[in-house]
Image: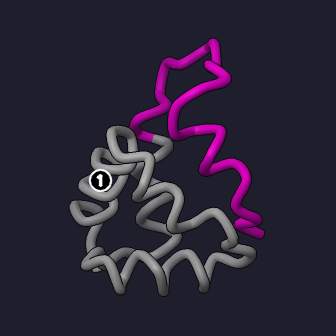
Amino acid sequence: MSKESAKQFLQEAVKNMSLRDKFTDVRTPKEFLDIAQTLGYSFTTEELEIIVKEASQGVETRRPTGIWPWLRTIPWI
């Protein structure tokens, strides 16, 4: 498992709506990770959170489009 895999996943998900669509019915972090693993990614929720925080540093305005609203629909807690 690695932060690099999480970073690669996010970079690809930004550009690939069909990748994001695979997670539409996800209801738990475990489901999210299981699907990501079947797609060849290997990271923990903690590693994903670290990468998301790094990518969000200094961001003051949130756009209603893109990957971030999609990630916020996953019930991480």
Find disc 1 in the rendering and name its residue: 7
Residue 16 image point, x, y percent: 35, 46
Question: Between residues 54 and 61, which one lies in front from this camera angle?
Answer: 61
Question: Between residues 40 and 49, which one lies in front from this camera angle?
Answer: 40
Residue at image position (49%, 31%) is 56
Residue at image position (29%, 45%) is 11
Name, please, the residue furthest toward the top.
61
User: Quick check: is 27 in the magenta stretch?
Assistant: no
Vertical relation: 14 (above or below) 1: above
Vertical relation: 19 (above or below) 14: below
**Does residue 65 appear to the left or right of 39 in the view shown?**
right
Please tell me how many numbered marks the rendered image carries.
Answer: 1
Residue 45 image point, x, y percent: 52, 71
Question: Between residues 26 and 58, which one lies in front from this camera angle?
Answer: 26
Residue 67 image point, x, y percent: 51, 40
Vertical relation: 53 (above or below) 44: above
**Does residue 4 appear to the left or right of 15 in the view shown?**
left
Residue at image position (67%, 73%) is 26
> Residue flagged by tag 1: what amino acid is it?
Lys
Q: SS at mark 1?
A: helix
Colouring mode (rainbow / by chain / secondary structure / one colour) = one colour
Quadrant the N terminus occupies: bottom left
Quadrant the C terminus occupies: bottom right
Question: Between residues 63 and 55, which one lies in front from this camera angle?
Answer: 63
Residue 23 placement: quadrant: bottom right
Q: Residues within 10 Å of mark 1 (few under 14, many from 20)?
A: many
Name, please, the residue furthest toward the front.
18
Residue 27 placement: quadrant: bottom right
Write the start and end of the magenta stretch as one range. 54-77
**Does residue 36 appear to the left or right of 29 in the view shown?**
left
Residue 18 image point, x, y percent: 42, 55
User: Quick check: is 69 in the magenta stretch?
Assistant: yes
